[in-house]
Amino acid sequence: MRISSPRRLFAGFALAAALIAAAPAAALDIDLTQTLAATPKTAEAIARLCERACLGNQRKSWLESAIVHADIGGSSVTVLLKLRSKHAAHGVTIYEETATVRVDADLSLADCGVANVRASSNNDLYRTLLRAFAPQIRDAVRRHGWFC
């Protein structure tokens, strides 16, 4: 079976998680990290985020993990992004810091939507930006947060 879009792939995993979660078993975690990291659209979005938020001539960003958690009570997703700001000149590193941004959200199989998005970071600046841009993040999720 050929999956034509990340949304359909994600929907398939979410549906499988829901079906398994409906059985009287323990919670299930589905690791989508490699699948999403290999998707050009995801890689481009993470790179664009770093272009706006990372500093230095050797900045880098990557998807650390993307896990769908499914159990009888519902499904959610946890995504960890790494954003590295680094500047080096003449073989000397002037500064380097790697921040983690964590995004948690609830998944609704009833309407194929993402809800209750919560974002946090171990970096003071990113925490402040996440709070400041929370309304825009919620609006973007409302417009684009459909996975099936």
Image: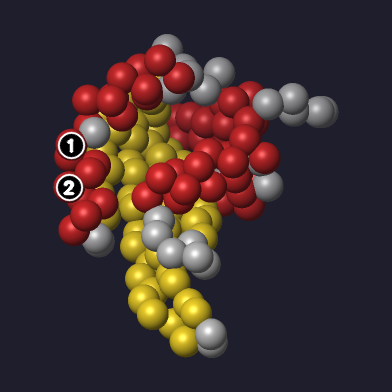
Q: Is residue 3 left or right of residue 71?
A: right
**Residue at 25% of width from left, 61% of height from top?**
122
**Residue at 43% of width from left, 70% of height from top?**
86
**Residue at 29% of width from left, 33% of height from top?**
117
Is the C terminus in the top left, top right, bottom left or bottom right quadrant? Answer: top right
Q: Where does label 2 land, which residue?
A: 128
Q: Where does label 1 land, which residue?
A: 132
Query: Is residue 67 in view?
Result: no
Query: Is residue 38 in view?
Result: yes
- 132 or 94, which is in the foreground? 94
**How many angstroms separate mark 1 from mark 2 (CA)?**
6 Å
- 109 or 56, which is in the foreground? 56
Q: Quadrant of residue 1?
A: top right
Say above or below: 80 vs 77.
below
Amino acid residing under circle 2: Thr
Q: In this view, does 101 lie to the left or right of 130?
A: right
The image shows residue 109 at horizontal and vertical percentages of: 44, 20
- 71 or 68, which is in the foreground? 68
Q: Residue furthest bottom?
A: 91
Badge 2, how many Cα within 10 Å: few under 14, some, many 20+? few
Give me the disc on residue 82.
Answer: none
The image shows residue 118 at horizontal and vertical percentages of: 26, 39
